[in-house]
Image: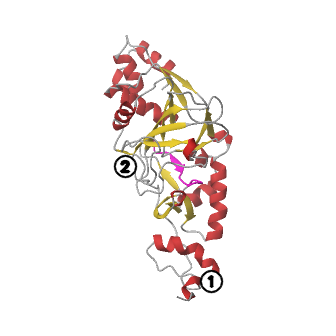
């Protein structure tokens, strides 16, 4: 419901309970300054002005959840939260985790993940946070601690829009596939999980592509060569500008995004320091609208040099991983 529709509802006397949470909040608190929502692109993203996050209440949390479902990514400029307030904010949305594989360069807070450019902390590949986990991140809340005067923007893509824009035959193919994700970028390829290529959002019901450049290694039901072609196509498709938002940071901005239907990418076009702190809301299991339609594709009978491409997938599936190295001398 738009703001115009909300005020029309008030004029005609509709019940407040029929309104979404954001409109209910405006109705319950008529004397409070109403948050101003500024939509940023047609694809996704909005800035929220006039909603302090220092000590949010239940109504505000429901408002944020509603806005996040509508816009996928939210930005709250000028918040300047300290680390404990940041963590307390995140705890309203679910259980938190810092990072299973990476350490913080400057702070040891157990529920905060920190990236500093001076320590290589520039996430310059498209990804959805912690997709290599059996239960990846549901939502991320980022605090921009320090940012360069120019450059260092972050891009987000709406992967539900990207799925919708595929041709019908390709959507049908992707619906029946799964993919192996792993933590190879963190030096831990053994940490992996298999997820649907297309996941269904548990709250909106929309389908979204759930493969990414950073963590997705292989489409399970395809050969290595076929997987390389389709994964490459899908990751390039998701990154098209028509599905994307590019956001220029200011120190003290809080960002929230839904990892179930977005991916993001840091543009490494800056000099100087860039420090972000993030709390990660965990506990969401990717669900597909349908079960995989084919068996996993791995070579088990004929062993050759290219069998090495199936080794990781065989191990993830609990199968014997046979390669040309099986003949190696001890």
Percent from the top left, x then y, of residue 275?
Answer: 52, 37
Residue 296 visible in the current orientation:
no
209 magenta-colored: yes
> Could you tell me which residue is drawn at 49 percent across and 48 percent down?
129
Q: Residue 57 carries which label?
A: none
Helix, strand or loop at mark 1: loop
> Could you tell me which residue is drawn at 46 percent across and 70 percent down?
316
Please state which of residues 149 and 183 is positioned toward the viewer in this rendering: 149
- For label 1, the crowd category at 10 Å Cα-Cα, with few meaning under 14, some 14 to 19 and many 20 or more, is few
- Residue extending furthest left? 58
Percent from the top left, x then y, of residue 59?
Answer: 34, 26
- In this rendering, is residue 306 above or below 49? below
- In this rendering, is residue 197 above or below 242? below
Name the image quarter holding residue 83: top left
Residue 26 visible in the current orientation:
yes
Q: How far apart are marks 1 and 2 (CA)?
A: 40 Å
Helix, strand or loop at mark 2: loop
- In this rendering, is residue 158 above or below 199? above
- For label 2, the crowd category at 10 Å Cα-Cα, with few meaning under 14, some 14 to 19 and many 20 or more, is some
Q: Which portion, as a residue range, is magenta?
A: 204-214
Task: Look at mark 2 in the image and give the residue it sits on.
Answer: 283
Is 16 placed left or right of 240 in the picture?
left
Name the image quarter holding residue 21: top left
Is 296 placed left or right of 9 in the picture?
right
Colour style of the rendered protein structure: secondary structure
Percent from the top left, x then y, of residue 197?
Answer: 53, 57
Secondary structure mostly seen in the magenta stretch:
loop
Percent from the top left, x then y, of residue 257?
Answer: 49, 38
Task: Look at mark 1 in the image and give the residue it sits on.
Answer: 304
Label 1 or label 2, whichever comes before in sequence order: 2
194 magenta-colored: no
> Could you tell me which residue is drawn at 50 percent across and 28 percent down?
253
């Amino acid at each position: 419901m738009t703001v115009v529709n909300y005020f029309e509802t008030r004029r005609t006397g509709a019940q407040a309970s029929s309104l979404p949470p954001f409109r209910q909040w405006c109705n319950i608190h008529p004397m409070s300054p109403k948050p101003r929502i500024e939509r940023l692109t047609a694809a996704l993203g909005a800035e929220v002005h006039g909603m302090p996050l220092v000590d949010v209440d239940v109504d505000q949390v429901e408002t944020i959840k509603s806005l996040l479902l509508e816009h996928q990514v939210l930005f709250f400029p000028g918040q300047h939260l300290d680390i404990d307030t940041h963590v307390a904010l995140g705890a309203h949305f679910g259980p938190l985790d810092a990072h299973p594989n990476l350490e913080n360069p400057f702070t040891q807070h157990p529920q905060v993940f920190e990236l500093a450019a001076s320590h290589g902390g520039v996430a310059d590949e498209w990804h959805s946070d912690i997709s290599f986990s059996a239960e990846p991140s549901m939502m991320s809340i980022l605090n921009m601690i320090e940012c360069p005067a120019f450059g260092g923007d972050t891009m987000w893509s709406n992967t539900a829009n990207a799925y919708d824009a595929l041709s019908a035959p390709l959507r049908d193919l992707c619906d029946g596939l799964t993919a192996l994700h792993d933590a190879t970028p963190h030096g831990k390829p053994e940490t992996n999980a298999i997820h649907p290529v297309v996941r269904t959002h548990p709250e909106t019901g929309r389908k979204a592509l759930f493969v990414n450049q950073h963590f997705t290694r292989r489409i399970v039901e395809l050969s290595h060569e076929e997987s390389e072609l389709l994964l490459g196509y899908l990751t390039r498709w998701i990154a098209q500008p028509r599905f994307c938002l590019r956001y220029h940071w200011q120190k003290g901005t809080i960002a929230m995004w839904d990892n179930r239907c977005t991916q993001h990418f840091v543009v490494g076009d800056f000099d100087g320091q860039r420090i972000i702190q993030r709390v990660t809301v965990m506990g969401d299991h990717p669900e597909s609208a349908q079960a995989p339609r084919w068996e996993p594709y791995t070579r088990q009978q004929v062993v050759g040099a290219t069998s090495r491409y199936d080794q990781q997938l065989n191990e993830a599936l609990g199968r014997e991983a046979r390669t040309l190295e099986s003949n190696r001398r001890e």
